[in-house]
Image (spheres, helix red, strand yellow):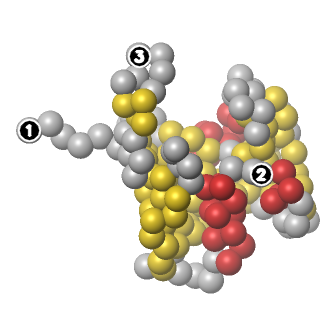
């Protein structure tokens, strides 16, 4: 029997003392997103998000709390030798900046702090928009959502756990 394969990823909603949110611009797509990405082999979730935020934005963070867990249950054809991109399990954390400075990387062409009200003017991806709204609405209960992103975004399940 073959073991199931999932991509595990983490995203950070980094909020500074001025209640601004950290966003980064992806080089590949040109879209504004929140820092985060795949957890590497042998790495735990929290170390993964701390590394990803630093790599993509130059900002050092500490994790405050988990707000949401997501499943992207859609699979699709990959590229560069990847036949099928598998289901993803994603965790969203609220983080606080503790050092570093805004920077770019091989993956990002810009990074900046924006007011909470401006975020949705910049972030266009439907999955990220719904995840940001869940962050804004966080009331102490963990959000869980199941969605697919291709061929178009579809929310399949939304609940608190």
Mark 3 nearby-residue class (10 Å; few <14, some 14–19, many ≥20) = few
Is disc 2 in contact with disc 3, using a CB cutoff of under 8 Å? no
Residue sitting nearer the eye, 37 or 82: 82
Mark 1 nearby-residue class (10 Å; few <14, some 14–19, many ≥20) = few
Q: Residue 1's mark?
A: 1
Residue at image coords 69%, 69%: 133
The x and y percentages for residue 87 are 38, 46
Residue at image coords 49%, 73%: 158
Query: Which residue has dot 2 on it?
Result: 123
Q: Is residue 147 above or below residue 160?
A: above
Extreme-left residue of the structure = 1
**SS assignment at label 1:** loop
Q: Quadrant of the C terminus?
A: bottom left
Q: How many marks?
A: 3
Q: Residue 30's mark?
A: none
Left/right placement of residue 44 relative to residue 1 reads: right
């Amino acid at each position: 029997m073959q073991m199931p394969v999932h991509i595990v990823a983490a995203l950070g909603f980094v909020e500074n003392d001025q209640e601004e949110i950290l966003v980064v611009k992806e080089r590949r797509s040109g879209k504004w997103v929140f820092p985060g990405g795949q957890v590497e082999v042998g790495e735990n979730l929290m170390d993964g998000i701390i590394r990803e935020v630093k790599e993509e934005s130059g900002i050092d963070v500490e994790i405050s709390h988990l707000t949401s867990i997501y499943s992207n249950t859609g699979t699709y054809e990959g590229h560069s030798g990847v036949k099928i991109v598998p289901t993803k399990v994603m965790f969203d954390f609220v983080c606080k900046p503790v050092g570093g400075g805004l920077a770019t990387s091989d993956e990002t062409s810009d990074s900046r702090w924006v007011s909470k009200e401006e975020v949705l003017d910049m972030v266009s991806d439907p999955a990220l928009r719904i995840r940001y709204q869940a962050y804004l609405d966080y009331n102490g209960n963990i959000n869980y959502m199941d969605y697919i992103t291709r061929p178009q975004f579809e929310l399949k399940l939304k609940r608190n756990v």
